[in-house]
Image (cartoon, helix red, strand yellow):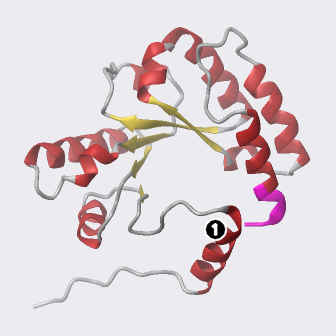
């Protein structure tokens, strides 16, 4: 990650730490993002904004216009904490979402809880069937990582990889990762 990318992230977070879907100013976020993306020469498709499922549900009317404006800009959109709110599955058709993020509360106990495993499996299957990327949050061990890989989960996040890092440490970690990418060991054969 380059210094100008960190500056872009810093400015985006300073301006908006989350999407405010309750706002009546639907184009405000889009209006601030467009010049920042241009200034930092970052294609909009390289920026993914997350909205929690509860925000989406609480402000469905305002969200539709705001999310449509962001999609026209080319930004990727994800629903965070999926499965924890009272969402209607119809919203997955209604909103132009690119990614579902399976909440860590399901991932944490999926290896010991049949209910959490069933919910995780269902969310991954639903996302894949709808052509969405699926991200599992809260991966803390290799066994969970292997199970998610066997379920064809697209991406994973969690402390198994790293805790939150300050920008300088993140840049160092990314450089080390690029030099020596981790690999999952294939299960031992018979």
Q: Nearer the viewer, residue 105 or 147?
A: 105
Q: Look at 22% across and 47% down and name the residue there.
A: 121
The residue positioned 76% from the left and 34% from the top of the image is: 15
Residue assigned mark 1: 170
Mark 1 crowd level (few <14, some 14–19, many ≥20, 10 Å Cα):
some
Residue 108 at x, y percent in the picture: 25, 53
Relative to 38, say whether 59 is above or below: above
The spot of residue 169 in percent (x, y) is 65, 71
Q: Is residue 188 left or right of residue 47?
A: left
Residue 127 position by quadrant = top left
Magenta span includes 87: no
Q: Say whether residue 22 is left or right of residue 14.
A: left
- Disc 1 on helix, strand or loop? helix
Q: Position of residue 4 (x, y in %)?
A: 84, 59
- Answer whether residue 5 is magenta in the image: yes
Magenta region: which residues?
1-6
Q: Position of residue 33 (x, y in %)?
A: 78, 34
Describe residue 131's horizontal placement relative to residue 140 as left or right: right
């Amino acid at each position: 990650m380059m210094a100008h990318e960190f500056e872009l992230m810093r400015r985006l977070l300073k301006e908006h730490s989350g999407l405010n879907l309750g706002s009546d100013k639907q184009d405000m976020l889009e209006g601030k993002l467009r010049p920042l993306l241009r200034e930092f020469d970052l294609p909009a498709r390289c920026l993914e904004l997350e909205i929690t499922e509860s925000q989406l549900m609480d402000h469905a009317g305002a969200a539709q216009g705001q999310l449509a404006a962001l999609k026209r800009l080319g930004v990727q959109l994800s629903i965070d904490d999926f499965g924890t709110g009272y969402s209607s599955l119809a919203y997955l058709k209604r909103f132009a979402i690119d990614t579902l993020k399976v909440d860590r509360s399901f991932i944490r106990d999926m290896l010991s809880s049949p209910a959490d495993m069933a919910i995780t499996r269902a969310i991954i299957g639903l996302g894949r069937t709808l052509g969405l990327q699926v991200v599992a949050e809260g991966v803390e061990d290799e066994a969970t990582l292997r199970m998610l890989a066997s379920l064809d989960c697209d991406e994973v996040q969690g402390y198994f990889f790293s805790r939150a890092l300050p920008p300088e440490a993140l840049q160092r970690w990314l450089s080390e990762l690029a030099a020596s990418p981790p690999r999952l060991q294939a299960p031992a054969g018979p």
